[in-house]
Amino acid sequence: MTEMKGNPLSCMRKYTCSNRKFIRTESLDISEATSNQPPRGKRAFLCGVSYKNQKYELRGAAHDLKNMKSLLVEQFNFPNDSILILADESHCSPTRNNIEVAFKWLMRGIQHGDSLVFYFSGHGLRQPDLHGDEIDGYDETICPVDFQTKGMILDNYINDTIVKPLISGVTLHAIVDSCHSGTILDLSHAYNIHTSKWEAGHHQSVNGKGTTGGRAICVSACEDFQLAADTSALSSEKEMAGAMTSTFIKAIKEAVAKKKKITYQEILNSMNKSLKQPDRTGGLGARIRRVFHRKILQDPLLSSSEVFDTNTEFKL
């Protein structure tokens, strides 16, 4: 079974007011969870949005969140108290306000040597670019649980909040499993998996889009013009999960099982292979193309604030 993590803008406009009474727009105050100074070293903000009782509810986000947290704790030694989680099922709901507060928590008091992670599983959309800085004419967005009433979070805001403040010696890894997520951080460089070359980002100008000396790296589920899928075809337990998240975790765990170091290039290659493999067996790829008239493909995308050797070891 396959579900899409986003829909064309025309579809999203079909949301009706009758749905809104079911949207959980209030949650317990996030200030308690973010009141203390975040720990030094490793720090992560994980956000999974299921949109419970909404028209476009996702069944894979909860599994994505659980699996990503386990990966950070078990494979990359993130302390549990260094991970902030927003989810429909938790006491801190992924509202727009809470996500924005969590972004600020992630960046608070960062120092040389810190490793930051932002993970998002949920719907992503595009909207017309009003600033004139996008070559394709669209800004990319992520959708909080209350986006119908509070609005979406734009790539420009995400860049301003968690990319620009990165100081020397601090690295941010963003892992974004949503539709239209290719340049969701507005980073300056995108890696073309088909040519194995870095290309310029999708901006008319990169002025003001860089960091303050640190490095931002993003692994996205797909290109800006593509849709990402939730599917059970890639899960050994046959549970609904993000295709991107499943293949990303699979790539790392397979390398660990072989007791080998894994590089960014190997992660991309493994993800791409896994996403195409079900196509040959009549699974995920075949269903996507059947539903969308063979026009939609999902290609993972690596982007960065600076060009680097993709054969370097992947570390968090």
Image (cartoon, rainbow, N blue to C red):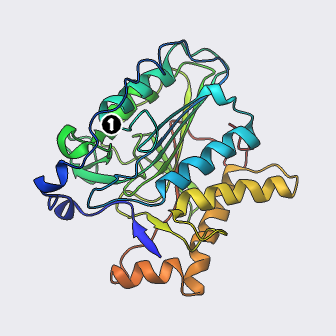
Residue shown at the point (21%, 45%) measured from the top left: 129
Residue shown at the point (13%, 57%) measured from the top left: 16
Position above or below: 2 against 82? below
Which corner quadrant of the image does residue 204 belong to?
Answer: top left
x then y, percent, for residue 160: 36, 27
Give the class, few, some or many, for how many residues have Cα within 10 Å of label 1's Cα (few <14, many ≥20).
many
Which corner quadrant of the image does residue 164 belong to?
Answer: top left
Amino acid type at mark 1 = Thr
Position above or below: 32 against 289? above
Q: Nearer the viewer, residue 9 or 64?
A: 64
Q: Is residue 165 visible?
A: no
Q: Is residue 233 visible?
A: yes
Residue shown at the point (41%, 46%) measured from the top left: 201
Q: Nearer the viewer, residue 140 or 238?
A: 238
Position above or below: 121 against 246? above
Quadrant for the C terminus, please. top right
Q: In the image as oriented, which residue stretches furthest toward the right?
A: 259
**In this rendering, position of residue 84 left or right of residue 139:** right
- The residue labelled by disc 1 is 95
x then y, percent, for residue 286: 48, 84
Residue shown at the point (44%, 40%) measured from the top left: 188
Dot 1 falls on a residue whose secondary structure is: loop
x then y, percent, for residue 233: 57, 74
x then y, percent, for residue 250: 69, 60
Q: Nearer the viewer, residue 226 or 118?
A: 118
